[in-house]
Image (cartoon, rainbow, N blue to C red):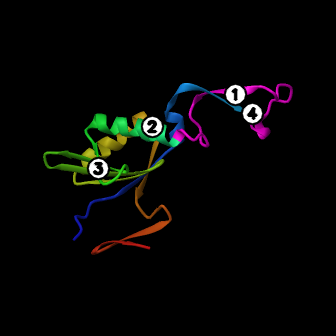
Amino acid sequence: MTREWFIHQLDVYNAFLNVILQEEVYMEQHPSFSHPTLSSHVCHLHKFIYGLKQAPRAWYTRLSDYLISFGFYASNTGTSPFIYSNGHDLIYLLVYVDDLLLTGNNSTLLRHLITLLNSQFKISDLGSVHYFLKIEVTKTAMGFMLS
């Protein structure tokens, strides 16, 4: 049985850039961006970038802390699902790196949460989920078909 909840697919732009480094990290200049006369110099990073092994964990911690401050709690079934429950309001948020699925029974609260997320992190609401993690999602009268 389906509750006919709308499932928003959200994308976080440059998710790792939302996290400030707490330690000093330096990297060699990328060959395509190397300064012609200062090629032996290194870059001092102030934010995480893709490719740093600490970046996914730091981003997850930043997002998780924000969601918990909103009233979510992490599911005990894994690190990805977050649940918000307040009275009759119920929201589920699934996280896969910088891709989010968001659904719940209160569309006004969902829109408010998307606005808040967008104020903290640049978020794009891609609308109803159609394709997530290489899985095609098709809404049917009975619920959703995954293929």
Judged from the image, the secondary structure of the residue bearing numbered disc 2 is loop
Q: Label 1 belongs to which residue? A: 43
Q: Is residue 19 visible?
A: yes
Q: Position of residue 83 (x, y in %)?
A: 27, 48
Q: Earlier in the sequence, mark 2 or mark 3?
A: 3
State the residue in front, 41 or 69. 41
Query: Which label number is shown at residue 75?
Result: 3
Q: Earlier in the sequence, mark 3 or mark 4?
A: 4
Viewer-nearest of labels 2 and 3?
Answer: 3
Give the left or right position of residue 78, taking residue 121 as reference: left
Please, what is the three-letter code of the amino acid marked with disc 3? Ser
Mark 2–mark 3 distance (CA, rounded to whole Å)? 22 Å
Task: Name the image quarter holding residue 45.
Answer: top right
Viewer-nearest of labels 3 and 4?
Answer: 3
From the image, which quarter does the N terminus lie in?
bottom left
Judged from the image, the secondary structure of the residue bearing numbered disc 1 is strand
Mark 1–mark 2 distance (CA, rounded to whole Å)? 25 Å
Query: Which label number is shown at residue 29?
Result: 4
Residue at the image point whose x is 25% and y is 64% from the top: 4
Q: Label 2 belongs to which residue? A: 121
Please, what is the three-letter code of the amino acid marked with disc 1? Cys
State the residue in front, 13 or 76. 76
Judged from the image, the secondary structure of the residue bearing numbered disc 3 is loop
Judged from the image, the secondary structure of the residue bearing numbered disc 4 is loop
Q: Earlier in the sequence, mark 4 or mark 1?
A: 4
Mark 4–mark 1 distance (CA, rounded to whole Å)? 6 Å
Q: Which residues are magenta?
A: 29-55
